[in-house]
Amino acid sequence: MKKLEPYFKIFCIEGKERCSHEFILDLTGLKKTTGVSEEDVAKRLIDFGFHAPTMSFPMPGTLMVEPTESEDK
């Protein structure tokens, strides 16, 4: 989450808070500037072996990323 924070808005995190088991990335700016949607990003993450993120919940144009789901056993 901290590596993505300079590039994307993170919803529901204030200041130096840490995420518990998930965080929500706002990708609306990315879509406006490049045309790349949250679905495009989600599919590409799956291509690289990451757990499929939840799309557009609880807000449209977002990805709910669960780092714990992408960790190796």
Image (cartoon, grey):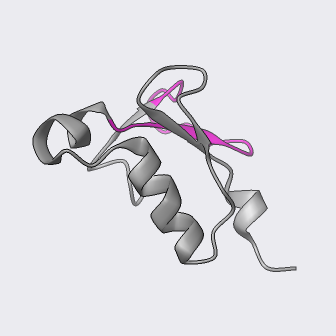
Chain part drawn in magenta = 11-27
Q: Residue at x 62, y 49 (%)?
A: 53
Q: Number of labelled discs?
A: 0
Using the rendered image of the protein, determine whether residue 1 is visible from the camera's viewpoint.
no
In the rendered image, the quadrant that contains the C terminus is bottom right
Give coordinates of residue 52: x percent, y percent: 66, 56
Q: Nearer the viewer, residue 60 or 12?
A: 60
Q: Nearer the viewer, residue 41 or 18?
A: 41
Image-quadrant location for residue 8 = top left
The residue most toward the top is 59
> What is the chief secondary structure element of the magenta stretch?
loop
Using the rendered image of the protein, determine whether residue 21 is visible from the camera's viewpoint.
yes
Task: Please check the rendered image and state whether residue 23 is part of the magenta-colored stretch, yes or no.
Answer: yes
Q: Is residue 44 left or right of residue 30?
A: right
Task: Please check the rendered image and state whether residue 58 is part of the magenta-colored stretch, yes or no.
Answer: no
Q: Is residue 5 above or below residue 14?
A: below
